[in-house]
Image (cartoon, coloured by chain):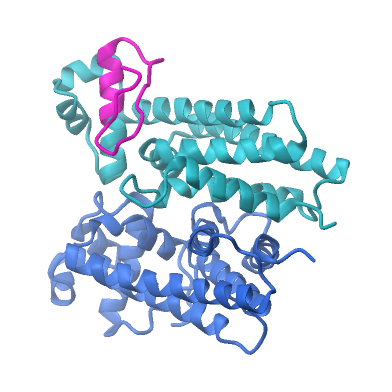
Chain colours: A cyan, B blue
Amino acid sequence: MSTAKDTAGEDMPWDEVTPEAARKLLVAAVEAFAEQGYHATTTRDIAGRAGMSPAALYIHYKTKEELLHRISRIGHEKALEVLSGAAGIEGTPSERLAEAVSSFVRWHAGRHNTARVVQYELDALSDEHRTEIVELRRRSDAVVREILREGVESGEFDVPDVPGTTLAVLSLCIDVARWFNTQGRRTPDEVGALYADLVLRMVTAQK
Amino acid sequence: MSTAKDTAGEDMPWDEVTPEAARKLLVAAVEAFAEQGYHATTTRDIAGRAGMSPAALYIHYKTKEELLHRISRIGHEKALEVLSGAAGIEGTPSERLAEAVSSFVRWHAGRHNTARVVQYELDALSDEHRTEIVELRRRSDAVVREILREGVESGEFDVPDVPGTTLAVLSLCIDVARWFNTQGRRTPDEVGALYADLVLRMVTAQK
């Protein structure tokens, strides 16, 4: 099922979620939350979309918040994995930053439904779960901040405000999930390449 | 009432909306939509927040969508006004771009609740209303695109992909509404200044 696409053309593996019924419910929840928002979605809606009964849903998830938390945690872990993997390639800070930005953009374009849910429904998480997710977000921040710091140290980059620039770089990538449209003119790869170029221009020291 | 603040510390004039009851309902709708999403909000919720009866709401707005449309149209018109005003100052393309970005960022930071509703609930508008709003968005795009084009022509800017860079610049400003927090470390002015600098770095021709 790892190449299955949902109606938005989004890659939808969620392979880590087992058994299959739990995975199907989670995919249905992502769709419903992305379409109508977390608060307007009932567990009955989610069960219905997955072709199951509400009772079958409760076997796997006690509450709607548990579904959101699961989606948010897996989504943030995947995004962090993509970012860390790209940042960890052999290369100069410029090469690593370009790879990190283009991969992170591709993820937000390719999985825009998941990314929207994960980004816009943070306030709906319980305090405990939100704290856990905020920690994952801090780690994504740290990946970008560290590349910027290394580039400044090596003289490749000129970045007067490293935390502010980190915020801007991540924000630029994340907002792709809002505007990206699979029917649009640009592919995820093209947006990734454009954004990597724009971000390098932001940080590269003038000769 | 033009200096009234809502609970998020956002400037909330909506002075153009009269009579006062219609304005109060609209302010209540922005709060409710920003908090729980459009689909989860009922007209009863909105009337309750404004201290009115559902019947009183129907005097001013026939449907919930009419409220969203009103918010979205005024919000987009204000954002376009801010952007056009800034872009229209006397100065070089660099000066005008810096002013446009910092003003647009300040608007999205200062009115983040309105901006979130306006940006994230586009799909909930009727086809006719969405078409009208898309046209306002095209005009915002055109303002930025025109400054970039002029800067390229004058040799100040080097922008290989003007439409793509326009998209990125506006996206960066808009996403401020998602992450901006009035309790955070940066003021709207500080974010505006940082972003104007980052955008100029993106587009300025290397000497």
Residue at x-position 58% and y-position 60%: B160
Q: Is residue B60 left or right of residue B68?
A: left
Based on the displayed image, in which of its 4 quarters is residue B109 positioned? bottom right
Where residue A190 appears, x then y in whole percent? 49, 45
Residue at x-position 61% and y-position 46%: A196
Q: Is residue A50 inside the magenta stretch?
A: no
Pick whichever, B9 or A192, lies toward us: A192
Total tally of numbered discs in the picture:
0
Q: Is residue B23 left or right of residue B63?
A: right
Pick whichever, A27 or A197, lies toward us: A197
Where residue A163 appears, x then y in whole percent? 72, 48
Pick whichever, B187 or B150, lies toward us: B150
Based on the displayed image, in which of its 4 quarters is residue A145 positioned? top right
Q: Is residue A189 above or below residue B96?
A: above
Q: Main secondary structure of the magenta part?
A: loop
Residue at x-position 69% and y-position 54%: A201
Q: Is residue B82 visible?
A: yes
Where residue B138 appears, x then y in whole percent? 38, 70
Pick whichever, A62 or B177, lies toward us: B177
The residue lying furthest to the top in this view is: A19
Q: Is residue A11 inside the magenta stretch?
A: yes
Magenta-tinted stretch:
A1-28
Q: Quadrant of the N terminus of chain B?
A: bottom left
